[in-house]
Image: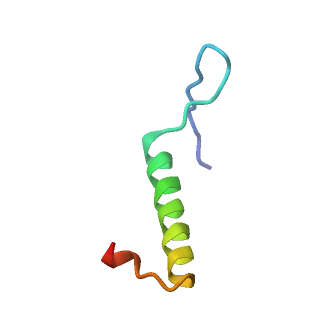
Amino acid sequence: MREWLYWYDQNGNRLIPPEEIIRQERQRAERLAERLRQMGVDPDTL
């Protein structure tokens, strides 16, 4: 069993931990790179 501790701001919104933000941004970058590849652009040369 895994227990989680979450932090919330004064409005009740859950704060996203830095590790989760990093993971989300990596996924976003991969999606954008794939989209460029589909358009015939090599994202590694930009």
Q: Quadrant of residue 35?
A: bottom right
Total marks shown come to 0
Residue sitting at the far right = 12
Give the residue drawn at x 54%, y 37%. Answer: 16
Give me the residue at 53% from left, 77% from top: 34
**Image position, residue 24 (x, y; %):** 53, 54
Name the residue: 55% across, 26% down. Answer: 7
Which colour assignment does the render follow? rainbow
Query: From what the image shows, is residue 4 above or below residue 2?
Result: above
The residue lying furthest to the top in this view is 10
Closer to the camera, 41 or 32? 41
Residue drawn 66% across the image and 16% down it: 11
Q: Where residue 33 sits: x, y (%)?
A: 48, 72
Query: In the image, is residue 24 above or below residue 31?
Result: above
Quick one: which residue is furthest to the left in this view?
Answer: 45
Q: Nearer the viewer, residue 25 or 15?
A: 25
Q: Is residue 11 above or below residue 36?
A: above
Residue 46 in the image, given as x and y percentages of width and height: 33, 72
